[in-house]
């Protein structure tokens, strides 16, 4: 049986095995997909050992940058993102690294939620690994303007400088902008602690502004609660992004893209 796994630390919480099992069932692909707990100082050894027989891995926190350094070649998305979340072992044994997070986010917004990014004013809050991974696909979707705002302003400025040749991007501090925008994407880890990044309430135009939290949880995230209370037109969490990035990885490995809608519905039910 063809073997795949998600590697991270911690890894118990991962929904990837369930998602890929549902994809395999739906598409009639024969494969096994497990969880691989790598020691914090042993990522490379764990992955190389698994890929002696395994055909691919997904990579999650905190190893995406190490995965970028490990592979022999990068997709254009991974090259720009500086991080890899999907590794494919090719027929000649070499390792290809891709980053499907950005494609997953854009697809969740545009296809699942039905919001075209074309011509929108978009605010990306946060300048860590997740933000960096989604900037190129966001700019490729044609927003009028993308502003990266971050608690540590220098990190937002560094990110904007990296992507300035890709589209209309700028950087600012969390409190610098006050005018409403069309879409706010929370790519900070603040929700993990139940916090909301301190951004002005006036960024939300009631009934108009959409809000997207990359984080997901069984209940409403802190950011989406803040957004709802300030009248956001729509609040979306990151579960759809998780399923869409997984579908991109599945397509890279198996050559067939699963239908994500029933899988997302099943996860929401669970
Ligand atoms: P990083 O640790 O790389 O970056 C964290 C970012 O959050 C930094 O910009 C940091 O600012 C900011 N931050 C943290 N706490 C606060 C706070 N209290 N107020 C304001 N800003 C804060 O994390 P990642 O980029 O890897 O992950 C970010 C989020 O994205 C996580 O919630 C993760 O779960 C989610 N994610 C979801 C995915 C999905 O498929 N749905 C995929 C990947 C990530 P500073 O630079 O100043 O420290």
Image (cartoon, rainbow, N blue to C red):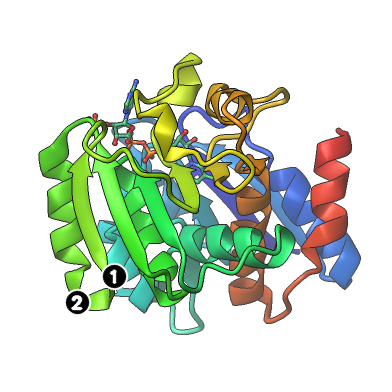
Judge whether 268 appears above or below 5 on screen.
above
Circle 1 SS class = helix
Judge whether 167 appears above or below 190 on screen.
below
Rendered residue at 42%/41% (across/down): 187
Disc 2: which residue: 165
- Circle nearer the N terminus (2, 1): 1
Q: Please, which residue is most extreme toward the top here?
A: 194
Rendered residue at 68%/81% (across/down): 255
Residue 131: give x, y in percent of width and height. 36, 49
Task: Name which quarter of the figure residue 132 lies in.
Answer: bottom left
Q: Is the distance from the Cβ of mark 2 to the nearest ligand 1 atom less than 8 Å? A: no
Q: CA distance from mark 2 to mark 1?
A: 15 Å
Q: Quadrant of ligand 1?
A: top left
In the displayed structure image, the side of residue 186 where residue 151 appears, left or right:
left
Q: Nearer the viewer, mark 2 or mark 1?
A: 2
Quadrant holding the N terminus: bottom right
Q: Residue 79: which disc?
A: 1
């Amino acid at each position: 049986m063809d073997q795949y796994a998600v590697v991270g630390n911690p890894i118990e919480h991962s929904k990837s095995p369930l998602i890929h099992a549902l994809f395999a069932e739906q598409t009639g692909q024969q494969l096994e997909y497990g969880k691989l707990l790598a020691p914090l100082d042993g990522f490379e050894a764990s992955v190389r050992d698994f890929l002696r027989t395994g055909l691919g891995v997904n990579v999650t926190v905190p190893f995406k940058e190490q995965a970028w350094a490990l592979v022999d070649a990068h997709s254009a998305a991974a090259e720009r993102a500086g991080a890899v979340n999907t590794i494919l072992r090719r027929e000649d044994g070499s390792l290809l690294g891709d980053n499907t997070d950005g494609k997953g986010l854009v697809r969740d917004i545009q296809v699942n939620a039905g919001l075209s990014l074309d011509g929108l004013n978009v605010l990306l809050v946060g300048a860590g690994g997740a933000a960096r991974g989604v900037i190129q696909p966001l700019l490729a979707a044609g927003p009028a303007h993308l502003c990266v705002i971050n608690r540590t302003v220098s990190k937002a400025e560094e990110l904007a400088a990296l992507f300035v040749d890709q589209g209309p991007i700028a950087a600012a501090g969390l409190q610098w902008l006050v005018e409403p925008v069309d879409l706010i994407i929370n790519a900070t880890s603040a929700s993990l602690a139940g916090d909301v990044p301190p951004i002005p309430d006036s960024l939300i135009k009631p009934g108009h502004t959409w809000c997207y939290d990359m984080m997901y949880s069984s209940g409403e995230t802190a950011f989406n609660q803040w957004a709802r209370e300030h009248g956001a037109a729509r609040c979306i969490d990151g579960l759809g992004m998780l399923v869409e990035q997984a579908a991109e990885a599945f397509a890279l490995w198996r050559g067939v893209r699963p239908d994500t809608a029933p899988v997302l519905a099943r996860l929401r039910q669970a």
